[in-house]
Amino acid sequence: MAWTEVSLGVRAILIVAVAAMAWFSIRFVLRITMRLFALGCLGLAVLVIIGGIAGWLR
C-alpha cells in the first residue's frame, strides 16, 4: 500500500501524531541543552573568579 492510497483522514492523523512527537522531542533536547549551557556559564564564571583571586593574591 502506497502513501497515496491511504485515506485523507488517516494521513492527517499520522501527520499530526508525527508533528506532536517531534514537538516533544525538540522540547526535551532544548531543555537538556539549556541546562548544559547554564552549567557551562556557571563554570566559566567560577574560572574567572578564581583567576581574579589568583591575580589579586599574586
Image: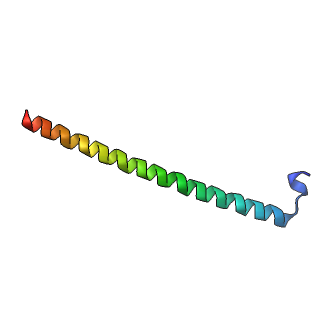
Which residue shows up at 13% across the image and 40% down it?
53
Please count the marks in the image.
Answer: 0
Residue furthest out toward the top: 58
Q: Nearer the viewer, residue 18 or 36?
A: 36
Which residue shows up at 37% across the image and 50% down it?
38
| Quarter holding residue 45 | top left
40 lies left or right of 54:
right
55 lies left or right of 25:
left
Quarter that holds the C terminus: top left
10 vs 25: above or below:
below
| Quarter holding residue 4 | bottom right
35 lies left or right of 15:
left
Which residue shows up at 46% across the image and 49% down it?
33
20 vs 1: above or below:
below
46 vs 5: above or below:
above
> Picture coordinates of residue 12 (x, y %)?
78, 64
Which residue shows up at 12% across the image and 35% down it?
55
> Picture coordinates of residue 16 (x, y %)?
71, 63
20 lies left or right of 8:
left
| Quarter holding residue 26 | bottom right
> Picture coordinates of residue 39 (x, y %)?
36, 48
